[in-house]
Image (cartoon, helix red, strand yellow):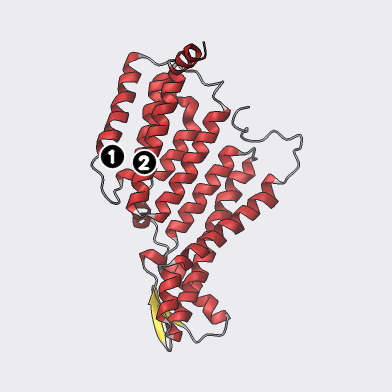
Amino acid sequence: MISNQLAQKCSEPKYWLLGIAASLMAVNLTLIWRSDNVDVMGTSLLFWGCVAVLISERKDELRLDSDLFSSLAGVLLIALVMLKSATVSGYDIFLRVAPLMSGLGIGLLASGARGIKQYWQEILMLGFIAIPPGLVLRLVDTAPATAKFSGFLLWYLGADVTREGIYIMLPEGSVEVGIGCNGLNLILQLLGLSMLVLLMFPTKKIHKVIVPVVGAIVAFAVNAARVALLAAIVASGNNKAFAYWHHGDGSLIFSTIAVAIFGAFCWLAILREEPDNEEPDNKVAGE
């Protein structure tokens, strides 16, 4: 009796879709883990997790009704992801694109081209992972502004500092604000968190402007403080400390600080607000 019920449940399309989605997510996260890219791993874990939460909250409301053409397109996308995943070794830009391809493939397979709009929030989240920082860097270079603000912090603290472009110079040494120190990765990370807050919680229209702006400002300021610290360490001649705060766990500490400050802001300014009579601009997933 129990075995018959279990077999009947396993034959339902939604369980097959769940298994496919879980497999794609596991493959993607495993490959990212092997690539040893901490930034992509953290972002992917967070966004995959939020997608899973949103789907689980709305599982009884989703319309599962696909057509032949949409199903074939979905199977093709999923097959491309699996085939390419089998050939990836180390970091590959495909690891960023695979979640979006997987989400689109599962959406087409589950609900067809007409019903895929049900998953716009989830697809938007997975699409954010696909944004390569290198492409954004070609459009927006934050290094000069970071160097200027870091130099200001050192000057304010009494250091004898000068700046030329992206170089911060102290009498005992200088640092260059390169790609790894321009703060773009941290800014994108907090912008991604901003998007999650706006999609997963009831917010007003004003929040759609305030939350991402505050996220970008916090990320920029915290990274500039890190660059100022690195410049001071270079001036002191402590190479071990520089390596720790530049490439080691010290760089992760500043990311944690930025996330904590931004999280505190969201909690105090938005999530802790008492509900009022004003209709939120977006509703909680599942309502």
The picture places residue 180, in percent across and down from the top left corner, at 38, 64
Q: Is residue 210 left or right of residue 170?
A: right
Residue drawn at (42%, 88%) of the image: 172
The picture places residue 173, in percent across and down from the top left corner, at 40, 85
Amino acid type indicated by mark 1: Ser
Q: Residues within 10 Å of mark 1 (few under 14, many from 20)?
A: some
The picture places residue 186, in percent across and down from the top left corner, at 47, 58
- The numbered mark, 2 or 1, whose residue comes first in the sequence reads 2
The picture places residue 239, in percent across and down from the top left corner, at 40, 80
Residue drawn at (64%, 54%) of the image: 265
Q: Is residue 4 left or right of residue 209?
A: left
Q: Residues within 10 Å of mark 2 (few under 14, many from 20)?
A: many
Image height of 170 relative to 210, above or below: below
Image height of 2 relative to 186, above or below: above
Mark 2 to mark 1: distance in Å?
8 Å
Q: Are marks 2 and 1 in contact (CB under 8 Å)?
A: yes
What residue did someone put label 2 on? 28
For the view shown, which residue lies furthest in the bottom direction?
A: 171
Image height of 165 relative to 37, above or below: below
Q: Which mark is residue 85?
A: 1
Secondary structure type for disc 2: helix
In depth, the one of 237 and 69 nearer the eye is 237
Amino acid type indicated by mark 2: Asn
Q: Which mark is residue 182?
A: none
The quadrant of the picture occupied by the C terminus is top right
